[in-house]
Image: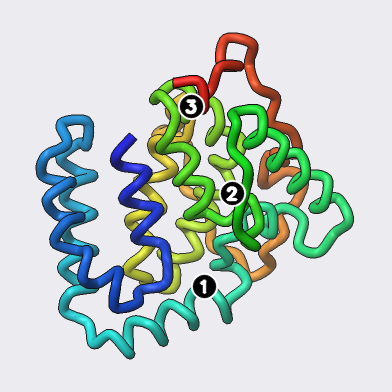
Amino acid sequence: MTLFKLLSALFEYPDEAMVEALPEVLALVSEDPEIEPAEREAIIAFVNWLTGMDITEAKALYVKTFDMTPEHALHLTHHLFGEDKNRGPALIDLTEYYKSYGLELDSNELPDYLPLVLEFASMLEPVEARVFLDPFAKVIAQLGANLDAAQSPWAPLVHLIEARARLVPTSFAPAPQPVTDTVCQDNDCEQPVTWNTPPQLAAGPASR
C-alpha cells in the first residue's frame, strides 16, 4: 500500500536525501487513487511544511521530538512496557511474525520502530495490513495525542496511521489524553504482545 510506504519515509530522519525526494512523494500522493482526499491533504501539508523548513532546523526538531522526548518515541512497544522485561518477548514475537512472511531484518533497528512497521505493512494487502496493525492501534492513538499536545507537525500523519490501523473503526470513542509517562496502564492500552499469523494469511509477501 503506497500510503504506508510514504508515511514510513516521512517518519525517517529528515536528511538531505529525504528532502530531495519530496517532489516524488507529492507525485505519488497525487497519482494513487487508494489515498483518500483527507489523507492526501494531510501529507501535502506536511511536505509543504518540511519543504519550507531550514534543513538544520528540521533535523534538530526531529531529534528533539522523537529522540529526546520519551512520550514521542517511535518504538511502539516502549509505550507499553518501557524497559520492563516483558518488552523483550514482545520484540521477539514481532520479529518472528516478520519471518513468517519471509522478511529477515537486515538492520540494527528494533522491529517495533514505526517506519519499519509501516514499511512491512506496505507490503501487505489492505486487510492483512489492518490485521497486523490493529494490535498497535491504541498505542498509535496515544502517540498521536502526545504529538498533538506538543503541536508537532508529525501529529496529523500519526492520525492517518491510526485510522488505517483499526479492524473496527472507533470514531465514536473519545480521543486519548496526552501522557507524560510513556508506559500505558492496564486500562489505557491494549498490550500487543503476540502477532499470530492468521491461517489465510500464511502466504505473505514473500510468496507473491
Label 1 element class: helix
Percent of width and height locating residue 8: 40, 53
Q: Is residue 84 left or right of residue 36?
A: right
On screen, 205 above or below 137? above
Image location (x, y in percent) of residue 17: 29, 72
Packing grade of label 1 (10 A; few <14, some 14-19, many >=20) is: some
Query: Could you say which is closer to the camera, residue 5 or residue 133?
Result: 5
Q: Which mark is residue 205?
A: 3
Q: How is the image coloured?
A: rainbow
As drawn, the residue found furthest toward the top would be 200
What secondary structure is marked by label 3?
A: helix
N-terminal-most mark, 1 or 3: 1
Select label 1 or label 3 by which is in front: 3
Rounded to the nearest angstrom, the CA distance separating label 1 from label 3 is 30 Å
Q: Earlier in the sequence, mark 3 or mark 2?
A: 2
Find residue 62 and report its horizontal and vertical position in percent: 43, 77
> Is residue 95 depicted above or below 87 in this figure?
above
- Under mark 1, the amino acid is Phe
Q: Is residue 148 above or below residue 169?
A: below
Give the residue displayed 55% in from the left and 61% down from the top: 74
Q: Residue at x 54, y 67 (%)?
A: 72
